[in-house]
Image (cartoon, grey):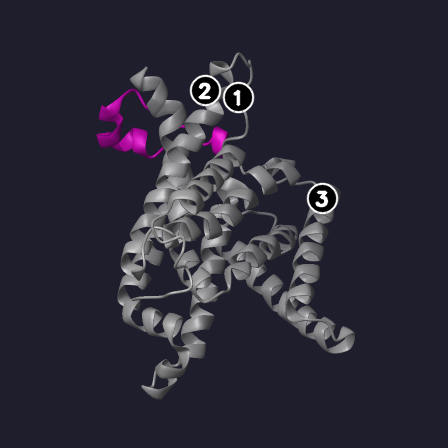
Amino acid sequence: MITEFIQFSLTPILIGILAGISCAIPGNFLILKSQALIGDAISHVVLPGIVVAFIFTGVISTIPMLLGAAGAAIVAVLLIEIIKRLGKIEPGAAMGVVFTGMFAFGVLILEQTDTSKVHLDVEHALMGNLESLIWLKAEGWESLFDRDALSTLPDELFRITLVCGLILFLTLIFWRWLKIVTFDEEYAKTIGIRSSLISFSLVIITAIAAVAAFESVGSIIVIAMFICPPAAARLMTNKLSTQVIWSIFFATLSAIFGYIIAGYGPHWFGGENAVSAAGMIAVFSGIILMLTCLYGPYRESVGQKKV
């Protein structure tokens, strides 16, 4: 049983946890700045950017994916401005039209492009490929100390670990500036903090998290993790540092129990087939948010902010 768990469940759960944490940390600041839609938007925009990058390079790798996502984000911003000025509609509506339109465009390109060799298709874009990220060479816990066995770990685990570590490092380094800009942008300007640069950097970090997570877990988890764990954490505390810790805990909980329920839940209720791990992780994060909405100690004081 232990060997089977390490081979078939350990790495997908770890990747799910790291992807959730990578999205949840910047999600805290986006929610407090009332910009939660940015995380959702980037999750939609990265798809056509990644597909176009693949068409030009013929490979799925981190640098082309990031460049493709950045290019798609620039196109999205330009389209939003054009629609706002020509159509004279409110910004939220313009954002919704552009992001959903670009995501649909990405799906259409996927359907018309031969991406089977790299496992990039519509289902992969939505649900990811968590279930396939297994570690067959593992023979038990001792494999964690076996260099040959470790070399066969899925590449996605190393990439999402690197991105998660980078996000944690940058958050700790720029914690003070992030707090000030998040809670009082005008005050940040008066003391010399370039709030626009900090905000732009936050969007870049959000894009990096989205691209890194998208490769393994698909857009559904990315969207859910940018919003659900931070929103649930906000209902548990009025202190930012504690909120970030709660969001990490909720993202971890969602990945672990979501994956377990996806694999074994149907059998508990008489079913024969497992369900999508990505979908169930997103569902479980939504359940956590619902419970905090009902029972969270700070659900009645969400409008208040404390650092």
Q: Is residue 143 left or right of residue 84?
A: left
Q: Position of residue 259 (x, y in %)?
A: 44, 30
The amino acid type of the residue labelled 1 equals: Ala
The foreground one among 73 and 155 is 73
* Label 3 Cα crowd, 10 Å radius (few <14 / some 14-19 / many 20+): some
The foreground one among 186 and 115 is 186
Residue at disc 2, secondary structure:
helix
Discs 2, 1 touching: Cβ within 8 Å:
yes
Magenta-drawn segment: 130-152
Toward which corner of the image does residue 272 lie, by quadrant?
top right
In the drawing, what numbered circle is on residue 264?
A: 2
Mark 2 and mark 1: Cα distance apart in space: 7 Å
Residue 171 visible somewhere in the drawing: yes
In the drawing, what numbered circle is on residue 274?
A: 1
The earlier-in-sequence mark between 3 and 2 is: 3
The earlier-in-sequence mark between 2 and 1 is: 2
In the drawing, what numbered circle is on residue 113?
A: 3
Q: Position of residue 31 (x, y in %)?
A: 45, 60
Q: Residue at x 45, y 78 (%)?
A: 196
The earlier-in-sequence mark between 3 and 1 is: 3
Question: Is 231 located above or below residue 280 in the figure?
Answer: below
